[in-house]
Amino acid sequence: MSEGKNSEEVSRTALFIFSLLLFIIICANFALLYLALPRNRIEGASTTTIRLCVGPPSDVYFIYPQEFAILNGTEHIIIYATNLYSIDTVKNVSIFSNVSLGLQHENIQYALGTIYFDGDTNYEMDLNTTILPDANCRYTFVAKAESICESKISTARRISINNINEPPNWSRYENELTTNFSKFTSWTRIENATIGIPGVGLINFSGLTLNFDDADLNSNVKIEHNNISINTGAEPCLDFFATLEFYNLSFKAPKPMANGKNCPASVCKFLSYENNTYKMKVYTFGINEQYFFSVAENMTPLLNIYSDTDRYERFVRQNVTFYANFTTVGGIILNGSPYYCEVSFKEWDNYSVPAVMNFNTNSSLYEYTRSFTTTGVHNWKVTCYSPGLELPYVTKESTFIIINRPPILLYAIPNITWLENRQFTGLRLDDYFADPDGEKLRYDASPVPHIKVEISNSSILTLTPDYFWYGNQTVRFYAHDPENLVAESNEVLLTVIHVIPKEFEAGEGGTSCIPFWNCTDWGPCLYSGIRLRTCTDLENCKTNKSRPEEYAECVYVPSCYDLVKNNGEEGVDCGGPCPPCPSCSDLVKNGREEGVDCGGICPPCPNCSDGIQNNGEEGVDCGGPCKPCSKVEMPAQISTPDNRRLVLIAEFIAGAAFLMIFSKIIAGALSSKI
């Protein structure tokens, strides 16, 4: 019921809109009539006839003949003409014909007669076609419908008058590829015709029935090596779609051409290229302009770019090589003047000044190598120049990632001892940690009961125990890089020494026990500026009376084995007055290196999957210590014609899915309103 009600509402709305438009048209006609009337006073009587033409224009079209009709003898012409929405009917229909004869397209007009209104909408007459000269697809029949208010014209084009059968002139093409026109007695309706020359080319009108009567194929059809055309100005009956075949071609990636230019998709379409035979479908041989079809190498520039990082990890200050594969669609390498490529990198939101890429004759690629000082995602682009080709230049953009390596602990952090109610400070954590990527580190520590741990921006460590607390605690320190990768220290023992107040009173209960103290030798002077010993009461009087000092301040003397960077050392216990510090070029596996001068704080150690020819390899990641070398496989190209075809199919499917979803949403909204 709701659908019927809604339909009635739509009908009433449409009727209202139509009535409103009709009213506006009538008012406009009266207004124009009023403005057209003379404003001078008219003496005496006068009469005026006003005729209003309301509604859409008259309708007229040919029922017979229609386009491409073949007429002979006496033909019955039928034309539909009416003006249903006007107070005037069509009074008469005049019929005439324009015919284009000869190569110069002279236009001749024939008046065929006038058909008067006889009470219905079909205007009919018999036409004796023998009064007209034979001509194939050259006649245009024109019907002009006349009424009081207006006139309307309709045409039926490319009509043939054929009262005399004449064979085509085709001696140049008499071979096994061409239809044998000699076996016919009438040539106005030839099915699936072919015209060709072996080893040269072929025109195939498969699926069509065409008029070859009196066609001069010798003069107006051209089939030469890599060149096919039909002069449709002289042979308009052959201006239909066809399949063209070009033989004995030697292109890598051929493309269709029309008049020496890229053939528009509305004119021709690639079908196949196999065994040096190229096939294309053409939709016209030219109406206003004759098309000369041929095949050419597709010299459209194609650029693909990639870098080492597409396969391998690359780190800060490690070389990265960037590649550009600059060819035509057919795979012809574009190298040497005037072709070249430039690469640039996005830094601080802008691309750097382009650098010229070098062409590697071994890989047939343009290459450029450099390192980077920051980690993360980087943008880069390549522009390759191809003056004289269809595109003067091609640009591609991409991204690459410089991998962030975690910080490392270079040296063990020493244990720390200091006195009760005092603060310890001065140790720099930067001396013990390092970041392979050279990034600034921040530090924190595990929670420590009774001891406040503070680390300044310059990595200086400060330890503050609670008042009157002494004892032992442990702590671990953590180094974080900007991307929050972490290195952990060794466990560090924190010792706070109890400071015993001196006692002057006798022992408890007035005992006469006299302590006998036995003390160890003084220990070394610690980094905190104190030295320690332990004293024991051999009499066990359980009193501190006369207890000797168990700590003493001292002047710390740096050494090359105290686990502290001091005394002009370049690192912890190395450099300066100490033995040289481990380096990434001393040919010794030392420090935190994973191999000789590699790994840890040094560049990554060579391996058989790093994309670099190193470590005695005979090729990149092959030979020597790696698997035997074989044919080098380059990374898959980013964009190929097949990939582009798949992308287009995917986009089409996605678009269709979107339209289906959108239509369901609209339908749902309309149904909810109903």
Image: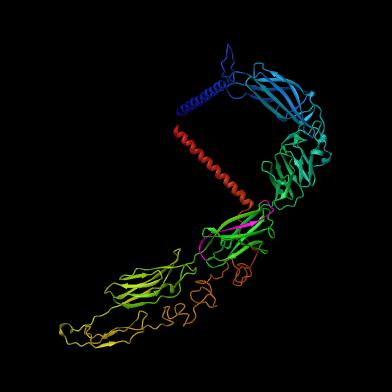
Query: Is 217 located above or below residue 413 in the figure?
Result: above
Query: Is 366 located above or below residue 569 in the figure?
Result: above
Left or right, 569 with reference to 449 = right
Q: Position of residue 270 (x, y in %)?
A: 69, 45
Left or right, 199 with reference to 603 = right
Q: Residue furthest top?
A: 45
**Does residue 540 appear anywhere in the picture?**
yes
Q: Is residue 378 magenta?
A: yes
The mark tally for this picture is: 0
Left or right, 533 with reference to 204 = left
Compare residues 118 and 589 and report the one nearer the observer. Answer: 118
Q: Position of residue 566 (x, y in %)?
A: 42, 79
Compare residues 125 and 652 and report the one nearer the observer. Answer: 125
Q: Position of residue 480 (x, y in %)?
A: 43, 66
Compare residues 247 and 553 and report the one nearer the observer. Answer: 553
Q: Residue furthest left?
A: 509
Res. 130 image quadrant: top right
Query: Is 465 located above or below residue 539 in the figure?
Result: above
Residue extent of the magenta highlight: 373-390
Q: Identify the residue at image location x=63%, y=51%.
A: 642
Compare residues 453 and 4 and report the one nearer the observer. Answer: 453
Quarter of the image where the N terminus is located: top left
Q: Is residue 389 magenta?
A: yes
Q: Identify the residue at image location x=58%, y=56%.
A: 397
